[in-house]
C-alpha cells in the first residue's frame, strides 16, 4: 500500500470537484508524547458527516489519547484539530463546553455513576448542558425516549448494580443520546462484553445512526465490530494513520502491518 497516497486522502477532497463531503472533524499532523513515549507522530483523520468511521489500533497505540485530544480533554504537543468548524485549541472553556454538548462520548467501560439510578444518570448531562435544552419541567419523556432507543425503558428506576454488563453499556449509550449529539465518539464500545452482547451493542449503534443521522467515530481493536459497522477504516500504527480504506480493501492488503489486524 502506498502510504503517501493514503495520508493524502485523509486531508479531504479537492475543493471545487462538486462531490466533496462535509467534514465534521479534521485532525491534521497531530503529535503527542509522554516523555520518551511518542504516541501520536503526525496523525491525520477526517470524519465526514453521517458516516461510520472506525479507527483500529492495537492496545496502547494511542486511540484513547487521540479521542481525548479531539474533545479537548488532553492537549496535543502540536497539530490541528477542528470539530464542526471550530479549532479546539482556540476555544475558551465555555465555548468548548457548548461544543461538547453536540458530541456524545461513550467512554471505554460504561462509566455510570454507581450511586445514581438509571434515570439520574441520564438526567446528569441534561443538567450540565442546560443551555442546549432550555428549561425542562419534566425530564421523563426525554429520558424514556433515550432508554427506548436501547430497549431499556423498563430499567429507568434501577441502580447500576442491578444491571448486567451489557445493560450498563446500553444505559451509557442512552446517556450519550440524551443531548441529541451530532457526533458520537465510541471508545471501545464492545470491549469486555461477550460476543452476543457485543453484537447487540453494534446493532444498537447502527440503528441509532440510522435514526438520528449522527456521524460516528468508533475506536476499537475488535475486528468483528469493525467489519460490521465501518463504512471506512483508518489503521493507527506507529502513531500515524498508516492505512485507510474499506474493510474489504484493507482486509485483503498484503502489507504485513495491515494484514496483522485481520489475522485471528
Ligand atoms: N496521561 C498519560 N500519561 C502518560 N502516558 C499516557 C497517558 N495517557 C496515555 N498514555 C500512554 O499513551 C499510550 C497510548 O495510550 P492509549 O491511547 O490509552 O492506548 P489505546 O490505544 O489502548 O487506547 C500508552 O503507552 C499509554 O501508557
Ligand atoms: Mg483506549
Image (cartoon, rainbow, N blue to C red):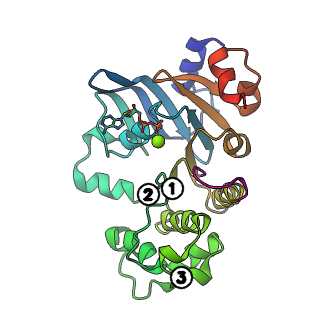
Query: Which quarter of the figure has residue 132?
Result: bottom left
For discs 2 and 3, the disc positioned in front in the rendered view: 3
**Badge 1 residue CB within 8 Å of ligand 2:** no
Where is residue 217 shown, x and y percent of the image? 55, 44
What residue lies at 50% left-to-right and 31% top-to-bottom? 45
Q: Can residue 16 be seen in this view?
A: yes
Q: Nearer the viewer, residue 243 or 82?
A: 243
Where is residue 156 shown, x and y percent of the image? 53, 82
User: Circles 2 and 3: CB distance less than 8 Å?
Assistant: no
What residue lies at 59% left-to-right and 30% top-to-bottom? 234
- Image quarter where the C terminus lies is top right
- The residue singled out by tag 1 in the image is 182
Disc 1 from disc 3: Cα separation? 25 Å
Magenta region: which residues? Answer: 190-196
Query: Is 6 positioned to the left or the right of 25 in the image?
Result: right
| Label located before the other in sequence (2 or 3) | 2
Label 3 secondary element: loop
| Label located before the other in sequence (1 or 3) | 3
Q: Is residue 15 visible?
A: no
Query: Is 104 positioned to the left or the right of 210 in the image?
Result: left
Q: Residue furthest left?
A: 92
Q: Which of 44 and 187 is in front in this view?
A: 187
| Label located before the other in sequence (2 or 1) | 2
Where is residue 251 shown, x and y percent of the image? 74, 27
Q: Is the magenta stretch mostly helix, strand or loop?
A: loop
Above or below 54: residue 143: below
- The residue singled out by tag 3 in the image is 156
Q: Which of 28 and 260 is in front in this view?
A: 260
Label 1 secondary element: loop
Which mark is drawn over residue 102?
2
User: Circles 2 and 1: CB distance less than 8 Å?
Assistant: yes
Label 2 secondary element: loop
Amino acid at each position: 500500500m502506498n502510504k503517501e497516497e493514503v495520508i493524502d486522502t485523509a486531508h479531504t477532497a479537492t475543493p471545487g470537484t462538486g462531490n466533496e463531503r462535509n467534514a465534521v472533524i479534521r485532525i491534521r499532523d497531530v503529535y503527542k508524547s509522554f516523555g520518551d513515549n511518542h504516541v501520536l507522530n503526525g496523525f491525520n483523520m477526517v470524519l465526514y458527516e453521517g458516516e461510520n468511521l472506525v479507527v483500529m489500533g492495537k492496545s496502547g497505540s494511542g486511540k484513547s489519547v487521540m479521542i481525548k485530544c479531539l474533545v479537548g480533554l488532553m492537549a496535543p504537543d502540536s497539530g490541528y484539530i477542528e470539530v464542526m468548524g471550530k479549532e479546539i485549541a482556540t476555544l475558551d472553556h465555555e465555548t468548548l463546553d457548548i461544543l461538547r454538548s453536540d458530541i456524545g462520548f461513550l467512554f471505554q467501560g460504561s462509566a455510570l455513576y454507581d450511586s445514581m439510578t438509571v434515570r439520574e444518570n441520564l438526567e446528569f448531562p441534561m443538567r450540565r448542558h442546560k443551555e442546549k435544552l432550555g428549561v425542562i419541567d419534566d425530564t421523563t419523556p426525554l429520558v424514556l425516549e433515550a432508554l427506548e432507543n436501547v430497549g431499556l425503558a423498563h430499567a429507568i428506576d434501577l441502580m447500576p448494580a442491578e444491571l448486567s454488563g451489557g445493560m450498563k453499556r446500553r444505559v451509557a449509550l442512552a446517556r450519550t443520546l440524551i443531548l441529541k449529539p451530532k457526533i458520537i465518539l465510541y471508545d471501545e464500545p464492545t470491549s469486555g462484553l461477550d460476543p452476543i452482547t457485543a453484537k447487540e451493542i453494534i446493532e444498537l449503534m447502527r440503528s441509532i445512526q440510522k435514526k438520528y443521522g449522527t456521524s460516528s467515530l468508533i475506536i476499537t481493536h475488535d475486528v468483528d465490530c469493525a467489519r460490521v459497522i465501518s463504512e471506512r477504516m483508518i489503521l493507527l500504527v506507529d502513531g500515524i494513520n498508516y492505512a485507510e480504506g474499506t474493510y474489504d480493501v484493507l482486509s485483503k492488503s498484503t502489507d504485513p502491518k495491515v494484514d496483522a489486524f485481520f489475522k485471528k
